[in-house]
Image (cartoon, rainbow, N blue to C red):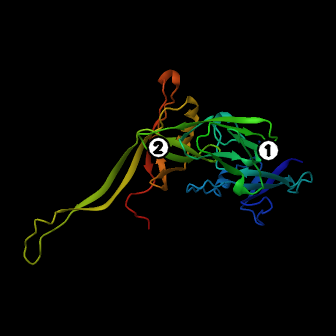
Amino acid sequence: MALKRIELDLYIWEGSITNQPTTPQYEINKSRIDTHNNITVEIGELVRDYLDLTFNDDYLSQTRYVRAVVEYFNELDNPFTFSNPQVFDFIATDGYGYFEDGTNPELSRHALISADNIYIPENTIGKLPIFAEGVGKVIIDSTTTQITDDGNTNQKIQYVTIPQNTSTIQVYDTDDTTLKKTIKVTNICEPKFTPYKITFTNKFGAFQDLYFFKKSVENTNVTDETFKRNTISNSTSTYQTYEGQKQRYNINSNTSLTLNTGFISVDMNQTIEELFFTENVWIRYKNKTLPVIPKSKTLQYKTSLNDKLINYTVDFDFAFDKINNVR
């Protein structure tokens, strides 16, 4: 008999794989369209509701277990007997694929950055996001770190510490012999300008750092409203010259920063692109982690052939008003 409909129970949770909730977050009942041979259910946006990304310079794993339990029913509305129900397990991150990747692309299962280059200030510790299930070891210069996976969502994405003045990182598969990615680390000595660290969620759903080393410009844009008031005293029918007729109110401001990367390799175009596409960005500013929004909306890709030395200028707005109006 032909497929008529499905019932899908969708479970989303954090912690151990054994901690599945007793009640599904979503119960979906969907019928087959007469002209189709299958039933399609999009669960990505439903799962994303349970991925609330927060960052305070702490680099925590932001993943969830997802289990879809699907039961199939025939034209008589009776359950099929073969493999019924079917159970599908996933690990979810807040990532994305590109159109050219096709339907449901599986993203990286080792190093969770696209570029093969990282730029870090001299004498500064960095972080490299990796997917613990797919990595056996990481070799940083000549030091080997074994990666373990205890099955908890709080360590599925791990942030390997990059020691000061590292030069090369090698990421290996779980067999400890297959090299999956080699990353060159460039340590920048910047004696003139103050480097700013921008952290954003990349296409893999991991926190990635990007330093802007060169010239920075800070601007404040003030907004206000005015009204014209009556300053005449009722008792004397006079007014005081030190009292203005025009009065400001609803005053606030927004601060913006213009940052420059300094000279980087063409390989970093991928990183800049993902910065432009992200929904979540933070800056390390005056010893605080503060949210910002990329204000630049147009990205002209640069190459060494066209531009010789590649530097990107990006504008950011702080994601809050200067005067505290949180209520």
Residue 282 relative to residue 178: left or right: left
Q: Is residue 298 above or below residue 287?
A: above
Q: Quadrant of the C terminus?
A: bottom left
Task: Confirm whether residue 318 shows in the render.
Answer: yes
Q: Position of residue 125 (x, y in %)?
A: 58, 47
- Where is residue 208, by image quadrant? top right
Asked which secondary structure carries label 2, the reply is: loop
Q: Of label 1 and label 2, which has the lower sequence position?
A: 1
Label for residue 195?
A: 2
What residue is shown with label 1? 38
Tell me what residue is drawn at x 11 percent, y 76 percent.
234
Of residues 180 and 33, which is closer to you in this image? 180
Of residues 259 and 79, which is closer to you in this image? 259
Residue closest to the far top:
305
Asked which secondary structure carries label 1, the reply is: loop
Q: Position of residue 310 (x, y in %)?
A: 49, 29
Q: Is residue 221 above or below residue 192?
A: below
Mark 1 burial class by Cα count in 10 Å: few <14, some 14-19, many 20+: few
Tell me what residue is drawn at x 48 percent, y 56 percent.
288
Residue type at numbered disc 2:
Pro
**Which-is-in-front pick, marks 1 and 2?**
2
- Where is residue 162, by image quadrant? top right
